Image: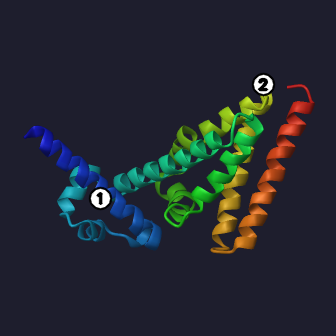
């Protein structure tokens, strides 16, 4: 019986996060009350508090879940790009841009999250998920030493800004193609320049 109860609790917690993910994406953090999440998930407000303690706690769980999804998309794309490190880096970067601009992710991860959980915690979550893969991919292309960390930070920032730009052009295939091409140029230039000089 305890196992069934634990499984039921885990299922309820997942359902609450799934529901909250949709509501935060549609309406934004400020417009969503815990009562809204509870009603949509078919649970009591007390159940939401039991699993996540507060609205901020629930939102942080949603952010972590979305970060995991984005990172998973990055890793999957890089793995499918074959053995070439530069190809893996490009594929992972493009996958990040597409995953983070998914309707369920962009508003929560890039607009609300920095304001709600704070820059320090947001950057930590980002570092634990997509950024760690970006750093590893850059290192695999031969970028090491003093350039690795700042180049990781700059490329990550450029991709986040590109995602915000794409969010202003929803369903615009031309804008997405231009963003992809621009990101390819940026990645290729970074690799070429960094590997051409002393590291």
Q: Residue at x 88, y 38 (%)?
A: 192
Left or right placement of residue 93 versus residue 64 in this view: right
Q: Residue at x 80, y 58 (%)?
A: 181
| Residue 193 drawn at (x, y percent) | 90, 38
- Point out the residue furthest to the right here: 196
In terms of image quadrants, where is residue 106?
Answer: bottom right
The residue carrying mark 1 is 16
Label 1 Cα crowd, 10 Å radius (few <14 / some 14-19 / many 20+):
many
Left or right placement of residue 24 versus residue 111 in this view: left
The answer to whether residue 166 is above or below residue 121 is below
- Point out the residue furthest to the left here: 1
Per the rendering, the mark at residue 86 is none
Label 2 Cα crowd, 10 Å radius (few <14 / some 14-19 / many 20+):
few
The answer to whether residue 128 is above or below residue 117 is above
Asked whether 56 or 43 is in front, the reply is: 43
The residue carrying mark 2 is 145
| Residue 114 drawn at (x, y percent) | 54, 55
| Residue 132 drawn at (x, y percent) | 60, 36
Asked whether 116 or 60 is in front, the reply is: 60
Asked whether 109 or 76 is in front, the reply is: 76
In terms of image quadrants, where is residue 162?
Answer: bottom right
State the CA–CA distance, disc 2 to disc 1. Answer: 44 Å
């Amino acid at each position: 019986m305890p196992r069934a109860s634990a499984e039921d609790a885990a299922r309820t917690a997942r359902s609450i996060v799934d529901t909250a993910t949709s509501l935060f994406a549609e309406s934004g953090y400020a417009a969503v009350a815990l009562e809204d999440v509870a009603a949509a998930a078919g649970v009591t407000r007390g159940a939401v508090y039991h699993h996540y303690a507060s609205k901020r706690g629930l939102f942080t769980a949603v952010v972590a879940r979305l970060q995991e999804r984005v990172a998973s998309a990055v890793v999957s794309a890089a793995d499918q790009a074959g053995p070439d490190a530069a190809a893996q880096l490009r594929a992972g970067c493009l996958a990040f841009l597409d995953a983070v601009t998914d309707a369920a992710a962009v508003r929560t991860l890039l607009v609300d999250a920095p304001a709600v959980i704070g820059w320090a915690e947001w950057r930590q979550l980002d570092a634990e998920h997509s950024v760690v893969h970006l750093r590893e991919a850059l290192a695999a292309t031969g970028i090491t030493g003093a350039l690795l960390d700042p180049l990781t930070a700059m490329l990550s920032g450029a991709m986040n800004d590109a995602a915000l730009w794409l969010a202003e052009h929803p369903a615009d295939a031309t804008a997405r193609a231009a963003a992809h091409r621009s990101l390819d140029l940026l990645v290729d230039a970074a690799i070429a320049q960094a590997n051409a000089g002393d590291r």
